[in-house]
Amino acid sequence: LGGPLARRLLTALVAAQCTTVSDDQLGEILWDAGRPPQAIAALRAYASRLRRALGGPGRAALRRQGRGYVLWLGQDATDAGRFTRGVEVGRELAESGRCTEAVRVLTEALAL
């Protein structure tokens, strides 16, 4: 991905969980109080490099939306997403009386 600013950008977008992060918010995350005069241009350059680094389907997942960026991730793209889905499935299994399967699914979710 490159240096720390590119990693900060990716981290901020993943943490936002498919929610748009504004240019201003990303500027604060990337540069704290030392934002350069051409911060928006630099941010767009980092986003472009991130798209290239993601490649394939990941490239299309990073989008400009309004006055910010969003990274569209499937629920299974992060441990948090997989955990949430595992809990949902485990509850459904338990409610339908399939307790052995529910325990297995919930144990896998907790292992994340």
Image (spheres, rainbow, N blue to C red):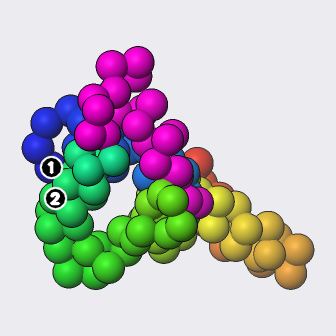
Residue that appears at 21% across and 33% down: 4
Q: Who's the residue at 48% across and 58% down the image? A: 68
Indicate whether residue 37 is drawn in magenta. Answer: yes
Q: Is residue 85 left or right of residue 54?
A: right
Please say if the residues under marks 1 and 2 sit with CB atoms less than 8 Å apart: yes
Write the start and end of the magenta stretch as one range. Answer: 19-39
Residue 1's tag is 1
Residue 86 place in picture, x, y as percent: 62, 65
The answer to which of marks 1 and 2 sits earlier in the sequence is 1
Res. 13 visible in picture: yes
Question: Which residue sits furthest front?
Answer: 37
Which residue is situated farthest in the left direction here?
A: 2
Is 1 situated above or below 81? Answer: above
User: Residue 44's quadrant in the figure?
Assistant: bottom left
- Helix, strand or loop at label 2? It is helix
Question: In the orientation shown, which residue stands out farthest toward the top?
Answer: 33
Report whether 54 appears left or right of 9. Answer: left
**Res 19 quadrant in image:** bottom right
Residue 39 located left or right of residue 66? left
Residue 35 belongs to the span the image colors magenta = yes
What is the secondary structure assignment of the residue under circle 1?
loop
- Say the numbered circle drawn on residue 49: 2
Q: Which mark is residue 108?
A: none
Q: Nearer the viewer, mark 1 or mark 2?
A: 2
Q: Residue at x 26, y 40 (%)?
A: 38
Residue closest to the eye, 82 or 36: 36
The residue type indicated by label 1 comes to Leu
Q: Nearer the viewer, residue 70 or 100?
A: 70
